Amino acid sequence: MAEHDPRWSEAAEAQAAILRVALNPILLAVHHIGSTAIPGLTAKPILDLMPVVGDLYVLDRRRSDLEAIGFAWWGEFGLPGRRYATKDECHSGRRLVQLHCFATGSPDIERHLVFRDYLRKRPELVTSYAHEKVRCRALYPDNSHAYGACKSAWIDAVEAAALADRLIS
Protein backbone atom coordinates (compact mmCIF):
# COMPACT_ATOMS: atom_id res chain seq x y z
CA MET A 1 0.00 0.00 0.00
CA ALA A 2 1.12 3.52 -0.73
CA GLU A 3 -0.03 6.94 0.37
CA HIS A 4 -2.18 8.65 -2.23
CA ASP A 5 -0.10 10.15 -5.00
CA PRO A 6 -1.68 13.04 -6.95
CA ARG A 7 0.32 11.89 -9.99
CA TRP A 8 -1.96 8.85 -10.23
CA SER A 9 -4.65 10.98 -11.86
CA GLU A 10 -2.11 12.29 -14.39
CA ALA A 11 -0.92 8.74 -15.12
CA ALA A 12 -4.54 7.63 -15.52
CA GLU A 13 -5.17 10.40 -18.05
CA ALA A 14 -2.00 9.47 -19.95
CA GLN A 15 -3.15 5.85 -20.17
CA ALA A 16 -6.63 7.01 -21.21
CA ALA A 17 -5.08 9.05 -24.05
CA ILE A 18 -3.21 5.97 -25.28
CA LEU A 19 -6.45 3.95 -25.14
CA ARG A 20 -8.34 6.62 -27.08
CA VAL A 21 -5.87 6.33 -29.95
CA ALA A 22 -5.70 2.53 -29.87
CA LEU A 23 -9.47 2.00 -29.67
CA ASN A 24 -10.69 4.82 -31.87
CA PRO A 25 -13.59 5.03 -32.79
CA ILE A 26 -15.21 2.43 -30.50
CA LEU A 27 -14.09 3.95 -27.19
CA LEU A 28 -16.78 6.22 -25.76
CA ALA A 29 -15.18 7.14 -22.42
CA VAL A 30 -12.43 6.16 -20.00
CA HIS A 31 -13.02 6.64 -16.27
CA HIS A 32 -10.41 6.48 -13.52
CA ILE A 33 -11.91 4.31 -10.75
CA GLY A 34 -10.68 2.36 -7.75
CA SER A 35 -8.57 3.51 -4.83
CA THR A 36 -6.05 5.49 -6.88
CA ALA A 37 -8.96 7.69 -8.06
CA ILE A 38 -9.87 8.77 -4.53
CA PRO A 39 -7.71 11.56 -3.08
CA GLY A 40 -6.36 10.79 0.38
CA LEU A 41 -6.88 7.03 0.15
CA THR A 42 -3.96 4.66 0.49
CA ALA A 43 -3.79 2.23 -2.40
CA LYS A 44 -1.76 -0.30 -4.25
CA PRO A 45 -0.16 1.84 -6.97
CA ILE A 46 -2.14 0.14 -9.74
CA LEU A 47 -4.43 2.27 -11.88
CA ASP A 48 -7.95 0.97 -12.39
CA LEU A 49 -9.48 2.35 -15.56
CA MET A 50 -12.98 1.73 -16.85
CA PRO A 51 -13.19 2.03 -20.62
CA VAL A 52 -16.75 2.27 -21.96
CA VAL A 53 -17.54 0.98 -25.44
CA GLY A 54 -20.76 0.62 -27.41
CA ASP A 55 -20.47 -3.15 -27.79
CA LEU A 56 -18.24 -5.65 -25.99
CA TYR A 57 -18.19 -7.98 -28.99
CA VAL A 58 -16.70 -5.21 -31.10
CA LEU A 59 -14.12 -4.73 -28.33
CA ASP A 60 -13.41 -8.47 -28.43
CA ARG A 61 -12.47 -8.07 -32.09
CA ARG A 62 -10.13 -5.20 -31.14
CA ARG A 63 -8.25 -7.27 -28.57
CA SER A 64 -5.06 -7.15 -30.67
CA ASP A 65 -5.13 -3.34 -30.49
CA LEU A 66 -4.93 -3.53 -26.70
CA GLU A 67 -2.23 -6.18 -26.86
CA ALA A 68 -0.24 -3.94 -29.23
CA ILE A 69 -0.05 -1.26 -26.53
CA GLY A 70 1.08 -3.70 -23.85
CA PHE A 71 -2.12 -5.10 -22.35
CA ALA A 72 -2.72 -8.76 -21.58
CA TRP A 73 -6.28 -9.78 -22.44
CA TRP A 74 -8.21 -11.84 -19.88
CA GLY A 75 -11.75 -11.72 -21.33
CA GLU A 76 -14.60 -11.68 -18.82
CA PHE A 77 -12.30 -13.05 -16.10
CA GLY A 78 -15.16 -14.13 -13.86
CA LEU A 79 -17.47 -11.16 -14.34
CA PRO A 80 -20.06 -11.51 -17.11
CA GLY A 81 -20.52 -8.26 -18.99
CA ARG A 82 -16.98 -7.09 -18.39
CA ARG A 83 -13.73 -7.42 -20.32
CA TYR A 84 -10.57 -7.33 -18.25
CA ALA A 85 -7.05 -6.50 -19.39
CA THR A 86 -3.84 -5.72 -17.52
CA LYS A 87 -0.60 -3.93 -18.26
CA ASP A 88 2.58 -4.78 -16.38
CA GLU A 89 5.90 -2.98 -16.28
CA CYS A 90 8.23 -4.69 -18.77
CA HIS A 91 11.39 -5.04 -16.71
CA SER A 92 9.90 -5.73 -13.25
CA GLY A 93 6.60 -7.39 -14.08
CA ARG A 94 4.88 -5.06 -11.59
CA ARG A 95 1.22 -4.45 -12.41
CA LEU A 96 0.62 -0.89 -13.63
CA VAL A 97 -2.92 -0.76 -15.03
CA GLN A 98 -6.09 -2.82 -14.90
CA LEU A 99 -8.86 -2.23 -17.42
CA HIS A 100 -12.44 -3.05 -16.49
CA CYS A 101 -14.26 -2.59 -19.81
CA PHE A 102 -18.04 -2.33 -20.00
CA ALA A 103 -20.59 -1.61 -22.71
CA THR A 104 -22.60 1.57 -22.44
CA GLY A 105 -25.72 1.00 -20.37
CA SER A 106 -24.09 -1.52 -18.04
CA PRO A 107 -25.21 -0.91 -14.45
CA ASP A 108 -21.61 -1.58 -13.39
CA ILE A 109 -20.55 1.74 -14.91
CA GLU A 110 -22.86 3.76 -12.69
CA ARG A 111 -22.05 1.60 -9.66
CA HIS A 112 -18.31 2.28 -9.97
CA LEU A 113 -18.71 5.99 -10.65
CA VAL A 114 -21.23 6.60 -7.89
CA PHE A 115 -19.03 4.80 -5.34
CA ARG A 116 -15.94 6.77 -6.41
CA ASP A 117 -17.73 10.13 -6.36
CA TYR A 118 -19.42 9.42 -3.01
CA LEU A 119 -16.04 8.78 -1.36
CA ARG A 120 -14.47 11.81 -3.02
CA LYS A 121 -17.07 13.98 -1.24
CA ARG A 122 -16.75 12.27 2.17
CA PRO A 123 -13.29 12.33 3.78
CA GLU A 124 -14.61 10.47 6.83
CA LEU A 125 -15.50 7.52 4.59
CA VAL A 126 -12.06 7.64 2.97
CA THR A 127 -10.57 7.27 6.45
CA SER A 128 -12.97 4.44 7.28
CA TYR A 129 -12.16 2.65 4.02
CA ALA A 130 -8.42 3.02 4.67
CA HIS A 131 -8.91 1.36 8.07
CA GLU A 132 -10.93 -1.44 6.49
CA LYS A 133 -8.20 -2.05 3.94
CA VAL A 134 -5.56 -2.23 6.69
CA ARG A 135 -7.73 -4.63 8.69
CA CYS A 136 -8.27 -6.93 5.71
CA ARG A 137 -4.62 -6.79 4.64
CA ALA A 138 -3.59 -7.84 8.18
CA LEU A 139 -6.00 -10.79 8.03
CA TYR A 140 -4.99 -11.88 4.50
CA PRO A 141 -1.51 -10.55 3.73
CA ASP A 142 -0.76 -13.16 1.06
CA ASN A 143 -4.18 -13.79 -0.45
CA SER A 144 -5.51 -11.04 -2.72
CA HIS A 145 -8.82 -12.84 -3.31
CA ALA A 146 -9.53 -13.21 0.42
CA TYR A 147 -8.45 -9.59 0.93
CA GLY A 148 -10.95 -8.48 -1.72
CA ALA A 149 -13.71 -10.61 -0.21
CA CYS A 150 -12.94 -9.16 3.22
CA LYS A 151 -13.48 -5.59 1.96
CA SER A 152 -16.61 -6.44 -0.01
CA ALA A 153 -19.15 -6.03 2.84
CA TRP A 154 -17.85 -2.51 3.55
CA ILE A 155 -17.83 -1.63 -0.14
CA ASP A 156 -21.32 -3.06 -0.70
CA ALA A 157 -22.76 -1.05 2.20
CA VAL A 158 -21.18 2.21 1.05
CA GLU A 159 -22.14 1.54 -2.55
CA ALA A 160 -25.78 1.03 -1.51
CA ALA A 161 -25.70 4.30 0.45
CA ALA A 162 -24.13 6.09 -2.53
CA LEU A 163 -26.75 4.77 -4.93
CA ALA A 164 -29.56 5.71 -2.52
CA ASP A 165 -28.06 9.18 -2.08
CA ARG A 166 -27.92 9.62 -5.85
CA LEU A 167 -31.64 8.83 -6.10
CA ILE A 168 -32.48 11.41 -3.42
CA SER A 169 -30.27 14.15 -4.89
Image (cartoon, rainbow, N blue to C red):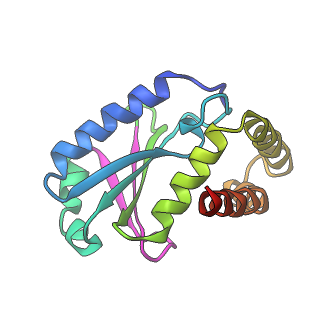
Percent position of residue 81, x then y: 42, 74
Q: In this view, does 62 lie above or below 14?
A: below
Residue beneath the point at 25% across and 52% down: 67
Figure quadrant of residue 117: top right
Return the residue nearer the eye: 159 or 50.
Answer: 159
Percent position of residue 99, x then y: 41, 52
Residue beneath the point at 33% across and 58% down: 52
76 in magenta: yes
Figure quadrant of residue 143: bottom right
- Numbered-mark total: 0
Asked if residue 24 shows in the view, the reply is yes
Query: 2 left or right of 37?
Result: right
As drawn, the residue found furthest toward the front would be 169
Return the residue nearer the eye: 98 or 122.
Answer: 122
Asked if residue 69 shows in the view, the reply is no
Query: 90 left or right of 135?
Result: left
